[in-house]
Image: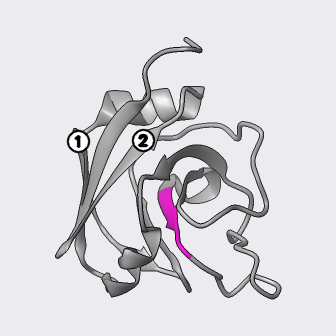
Amino acid sequence: MSGQAPRAIRIDAGAVSVPARLNDSPTASAIWAALPIEAKAETWGDEIYFGIGLDLKAESPKAVVDVGDLGYWPPGRAFCIFFGPTPASRGEEIRPASPVNLVGQVVGDATTFRKVRAGTRVRIERS
């Protein structure tokens, strides 16, 4: 599967609409196959997450991520969008509640997600 074209997606959350892409990991492939996905956003510091109903295993999970990273959090069966420090962060790092599988990256300015409040409807679809 490696070497395939990046899988372009769009994440809509209220007034925010951001392009992103999924990587070629098995976790990202399972998410791609399940699209479109709709859920209600939860917030945790500068992170949005929401359950997506997929029960996937940990896959080289990362304890610290970068601005714009998209992750899958196995304990919560949740899709995560990271755009700044969380309550678990030390200093400026971005630390999920527990390690996540990296599944992709926001294309452009991920900090626009700061406008999104808990309870906002989020939709991820192929673009």
Quadrant location of the N terminus in the rendered image: top right
Q: Residue at x 79, y 60 (%)?
A: 63
Q: Earlier in the sequence, mark 2 or mark 1?
A: 2
Colour convention of the picture: one colour
Q: How many marks?
A: 2
Tag 2 residue: 21
Residue that mark 1 sits on: 36
Distance of mark 2 from mark 1, alpha carbons? 14 Å
Q: Residues within 10 Å of mark 2 (few under 14, many from 20)?
A: many
Quarter of the figure that contains the C terminus: top left
- Which residue is found at the position 57% from the left and 26% from the top? 26
The correct choice, above or below, for 44 with respect to 74 in the image is below
Vertical position of residue 44 compared to residue 102: above or below: below
x and y, in percent, of residue 96 in the image? 68, 69
Asked whether 71 falls inside the magenta stretch, the response is no
What range is drawn magenta here?
79-83
Q: Residue at x 55, y 34 (%)?
A: 27
Residue ranking furthest to the right: 90
Estimate how packed mark 1 is, as few (under 14), some (14 to 19) or many (20 or more) residues with alpha carbons within 10 Å: some
The spot of residue 67 in percent (x, y) is 59, 67
Predominant SS of the magenta segment? strand
At horizontal 59% and vertical 28% (from top left) the residue drawn is: 25
Tell me where residue 57 appears, x and y as whole percent.
Answer: 65, 37
Please name the amino acid that badge 2 sits on. Arg
For residue 98, which quarter of the picture? bottom right
Give the side of residue 41 with respect to residue 4, left or right.
left
Residue 35 position within the rendered picture, expressed as x and y whole percent measured from the top left = 27, 37
Which mark lies nearer to you, 2 or 1? 2
